[in-house]
Image: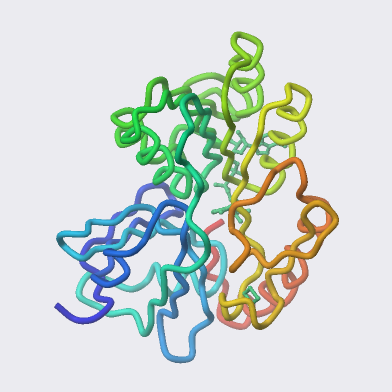
Amino acid sequence: MKKYEIVKKDLITPNTYRMDIYAPRIAKKSLAGQFIILRATEDGERIPLTTADVDREKGLVTIIFQMVGLSTNILGGMNVGDALHDFVGPLGRPSELDGLKKVICIGGGVGTAVVYPAVKQLHENGAQVDVIVGARNKEYVILEDEIKKNSTHLYITTDDGSYGRKGFVTDQLKDLLDKSNDYDEVIAIGPMIMMKFVSKLTKEYGVKTTVSLNPIMVDGTGMCGGCRVTVGGQVKYACVDGPDFDGHEVDFDELMKRQNTYTEEEKDKERKCGGIYHD
Ligand code: NAD
Ligand code: FES
């Protein structure tokens, strides 16, 4: 098999692909919470993606990505048998999951792929894992079967009520916390706005909350400063200090402003390339 070859490719929502990449050394070492940075082509942009799963025996790393810009659309256009130009990792610090006995894991949209390794690890550790998966509608719910197999309870919410409970993940979270407030931790991964409101709610209940941040990244090794975030009033770099952080300490408003810095450039690139956005 070629280095970084795409071994499997599936469209799992109208704009989300799941790919298995042949990268045995990364598959061997990667732990829940860590990420890789890939370039589809030599002149391509670097794309940071948290590993969604690994098959250590076969040497495969699973990535799940939404086609929301030029680079992820180019990646989505590649096929089984093609090889990525580079694939670097595992990067970042693994999630701290040891000792947790009762946890709520929340996956918002494509963030469900990022929380899944933690769900699986906690389940293997024998913890009670209650999972909330939120999506805009039924078509965007991902990894339902895999999570069902690896969790104690699975609650699904959709914004439009087309599947599971109608509403946001925070509606279901509030109900769980009202019922029993003895959870060790909440782990929430999804859109920034979701992580902000989950953290706001859990603060009221006094439950420790971990979020995984995905700011703009360039080198992924702490050198460029691109992924700078403010946590507890201090500057941190998501690629080396994270990507997991205490949700009660993150300055989400600053992060959301920074996240939109290149929106116009992305749109401009899209216009020049004939508009191939899928979102
Ligand atoms: P989405 O916009 O469809 O939202 C997913 C769910 O988040 C919703 O169904 C809802 O339950 C919840 N949510 C949204 N707004 C909320 C609010 N105001 N209050 C409470 N809950 C709310 O998600 P999507 O389009 O699949 O996600 C795309 C976003 O996820 C992108 O912005 C991307 O950057 C981010 N993302 C983050 C990570 C990460 O590691 N943190 C990884 C992948 C993607
Ligand atoms: Fe450059 Fe983190 S990506 S410092």
Observer-nearest of 18 and 54: 54
Residue 229 quadrant: bottom right
Q: Position of residue 244 (x, y in %)?
A: 59, 52
Q: Position of residue 246 (x, y in %)?
A: 68, 45
- Residue drawn at (47%, 44%), measured in percent from left and top? 115
Q: Is residue 275 left or right of residue 32?
A: right
Depicted 150 relative to depicted 257: above or below: above
- Residue drawn at (72%, 36%), measured in percent from left and top? 199
Depicted 206 relative to depicted 259: above or below: above
Q: Position of residue 238 (x, y in %)?
A: 64, 64
User: Seen from this angle, which residue lies furthest bottom?
Assistant: 43
Q: Quadrant of the C terminus?
A: bottom right
Q: Position of residue 218 (x, y in %)?
A: 60, 79
Residue 76 quadrant: bottom left
Q: Quadrant location of ligand 2?
A: bottom right
User: Seen from this angle, which residue lies furthest top?
Assistant: 179
Q: Is residue 58 left or right of residue 269?
A: left
